[in-house]
Amino acid sequence: MNFLKAQLVRALISHFGDDDRRIDHALAVTYWAERILEVEGGDREVVLAVGLLHDVGIKPAEAEHGYNNGKMQETYGPPIVREILAGIGFDASKTEEACAIVGAHHTPAGVPGPNFPILWDADMIVNLGDELADAPRQKLESIIEKSFKTETGRALARNVLLK
């Protein structure tokens, strides 16, 4: 499994080049996804793939449009994920699930199964920490209660964001 993670990190860095902010974000999301996975269960290979590659659609969206948003990331990401995963010999059925998750990672309804909620919560922990670190405690508590999909993600978010 460590070899898979190394391959995915290498692909992430190759894709984003010197965009350290995006690389750091993906590494942080993957850290939290692995923590959630330990408790919630799921497919470790899929969770690693989507944790590290969920935002790869940003780069082509920005190149083509000059900006990106969640819908663009969901559109441009899956073909890149498919190409990366095929290049490392990733299982085809797991590739399809990873592409579906990346293609819905800004859509709350998401993808059925245990892996999407893990990515959703991990991404939320990182994004809330980046974007709302100084928000009033009550606002953060409300977002955590309403927006998180797993109990583990919710508990981790409380520990990290409501210090």
Image: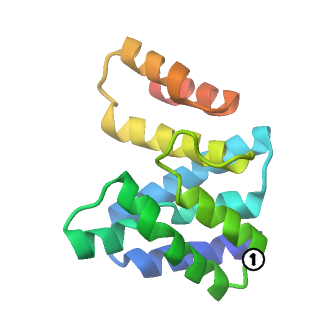
Q: Residue at x 67, y 32 (%)?
A: 150
Residue 2: quadrant of the picture:
bottom right
Q: Is residue 59 left or right of residue 125?
A: left
Secondary structure found at label 1: helix
- 38 or 71, which lies in front? 71
- 72 or 21, which lies in front? 72
Q: Residue at x 57, y 30 (%)?
A: 148
Q: Residue at x 74, y 47 (%)?
A: 113
Q: Residue at x 58, y 55 (%)?
A: 30
Q: Position of residue 109 (x, y in %)?
A: 57, 40
* Label 1 neighbour load within 10 Å: few <14, some 14-19, many 20+: few
Q: Quadrant of the N terminus?
A: bottom right
- Figure colour scheme: rainbow
- 83 or 75, which lies in front? 75
Residue projecting furthest to the bottom: 87
Q: Position of residue 49 (x, y in %)?
A: 63, 65
* 133 lies above or below 83: above
Residue 16: quadrant of the picture:
bottom left
Which residue is under mark 1? 92
Residue flagged by tag 1: what amino acid is it? Ala
Residue 49 is at least partly visible in this image: no
Q: Position of residue 54 (x, y in %)?
A: 51, 61
